[in-house]
Image (cartoon, rainbow, N blue to C red):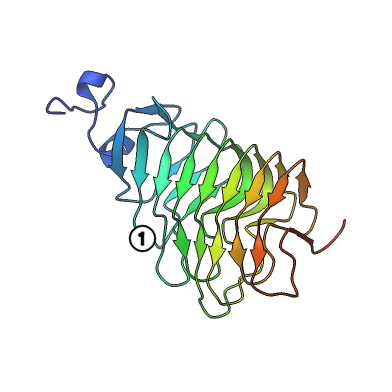
Amino acid sequence: NPNAEAPYDTWEKAATTLADALASLESGMTLHVRNGTYAITGAFTLDSGKAIVSENGPEKTIFQSKSFSTPAITVKGEGSRLSGVTVKGLTAPGNKFGGVELYSGGEISNCVFLNANHVNAAPGTMRMYGGLLADCLFQNSQRGSGAGATSSTALSISAGTMERCRVIDSWGDGGSVKYGAVYVYGTGVVRNTVVAGSCQPGYTGFYLGGSGRVESCTVANNESTTTSQNAAVYIASLT
């Protein structure tokens, strides 16, 4: 856009890069994103009621990530929201985590997360410490074979609610990956969600610990490469 001009408050003056738009995003503001592929060039946080919402949904709006040593996207606090985008290629060097973190008050909805890949002791795509995760797709989340790696292949959820999501085709490559495609512990709750097609050593499907709950979910076609362990739902503790 040759007419791009901060604070980018009309389509005629809209920013052409995600970094420029985020630099002008203030508390309580919503960044509206039209069709296109946008590079995540720096890790960012949506807090204090900041939101990113696509105009035409995740099929048309793509955020391409790169390797980060800290979470690429963090969403936290009341009114803070990420909605309607596809996020590709979340990754990190070594034992770092360059995925997505969601905290109390934050919301992520109607998003697609593709081809995330982490090596050591982090989930493949997302850590959830609170908030609401709804109507999202996680596909091809990968956990590598780092020495002593012990985590889930797609998500770990210690608090908050995940509902109406799909987690498909997650996989772990060697190591001691064992906490399922989705690890639910603490006070995390998962409802009406599909976990299917995961393949890894250890437990696949859901791994439940603490007071974590799974309600009205579908778990299908998951495979453990460790024959003595469960490919559907493993309950580590009952409280």
How far from the left and from the top, in percent, is residue 190? 71, 44
Q: Is residue 125 left or right of residue 93?
A: right
Residue 154, located in which quarter of the rendered image? Answer: bottom right
Residue pointed to by mark 1: 67
Q: Is residue 65 left or right of residue 220?
A: left
* Element under disc 1: loop
How far from the left and from the top, in percent, is residue 175? 57, 77
Residue neighbourhood size for the residue with mark 1, other residues' Cα within 10 Å, grouped as few (<14), some (14–19), many (≥20): many
Q: Residue at x 67, y 71 (%)?
A: 202
Q: Is residue 97 visible?
A: no
Q: Residue furthest bottom?
A: 147
Q: Residue at x 41, y 45 (%)?
A: 87
Q: Nearer the viewer, residue 20 or 110?
A: 110
Say what amino acid the circle numbered 1 marks. Ser
Q: Is residue 127 visible?
A: yes
How far from the left and from the top, in percent, is residue 208? 75, 58
How far from the left and from the top, in percent, is residue 92? 41, 64
Q: Residue furthest right?
A: 239
Q: Residue at x 41, y 52 (%)?
A: 72
Assign the C terminus to one quadrant of the image: bottom right
Residue 135, located in which quarter of the rendered image? Answer: top right
